[in-house]
Amino acid sequence: MARSSSGFVAGLTVAAIAAVGFLAFQASANVPDTLGKPSASVSAKSSAPKAPRDKKNPTALPSPSGTGARVVYSVGDDRVWLVGAGNKVKRTFKVTPGTVDPAAGTYAVTTRAGAVTGSDGTQIEHVVRFTLVNGVAIGFSAAVSGSTEAPDPEKKLGGIRASRADGDAMWAFATVGAKVVVVK
């Protein structure tokens, strides 16, 4: 009898997790683009000061970029840092941004997708979304083809493309709820 009870509980747990994931996805599609921005006066093309950089080590983690485990994305440097406990950088890599940039601020990963077709028609994998800007979803991904070419400047695209290896690392690191800090 205990076996059937544990199977029933496991089934309920799986159903609950699936329901929460579905609701989170629906909620992220309906979030106003002002949510998650540091203030109403900051726009997607903000004039916020650029985070100071170590001129001797341009791949050094920008300061200030927060504390704790987090993804740090520099819009100005087109670079990402995966930061673990104790401010230890686990990985840093260059990315190719979309045509729509997120405002500087702190966000959380809202949804993820293993494999989808991007807004530009490219097959992408390991999609990690963290905000919307004027209805455009902003997130990290990797093209299945491995391409990191610049997007069509005439389209409104929020995909921040990484190599497949870097996309794999992002996927493993940035689960739903993970902190994402955007700096200029």
Image: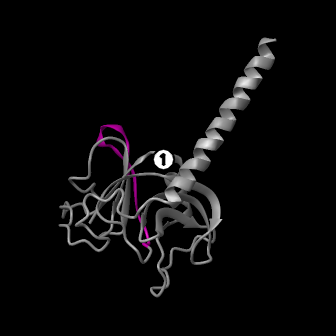
Question: Who's the residue at 37% across and 47% down the image?
Answer: 70
Q: Percent from the top left, x then y, of residue 68?
A: 32, 41
Depth check: 132 or 86 in front? 132
Q: Is residue 42 left or right of residue 117?
A: left
Q: Which residue is mark 1?
A: 173
Viewer-proximal residue among 15 and 61: 15
Measured as percent of width and height from the top left, residue 67 is found at 28, 43
What residue sits 62% from the left and 77% below the top?
A: 121
Q: Quadrant of residue 52?
A: bottom left
* Residue 75 in magenta stretch: no
Residue in the picture at 30% in, 43% down:
87
The magenta segment: 82-97
Residue 180: image location, x then y, percent: 38, 53
Hey, what amino acid is under mark 1? Answer: Phe
Quarter containing the N terminus? top right
Tell me the quadrant of the picture where the C terminus can be found.
Answer: bottom left
Residue at 64% across / 36% down in the picture? 16
Position of residue 73 in the picture relative to residue 111 (left or right): left
Instruction: Check the image and tell me how it is coloured.
Output: one colour
Q: Is residue 148 left or right of residue 8?
A: left
Foreground residue among 40 and 91:
40
Compared to residue 137, the image places residue 100 above or below, namely: below
Front-lying residue, 158 or 125: 158
Q: Is residue 85 magenta?
A: yes
Residue 59 quadrant: bottom left
Q: Position of residue 115 (x, y in %)?
A: 65, 61
Quadrant of residue 58 within the rendered picture: bottom left
Find numbered disc 1 in the image and state the secondary structure of the residue it sits on: helix
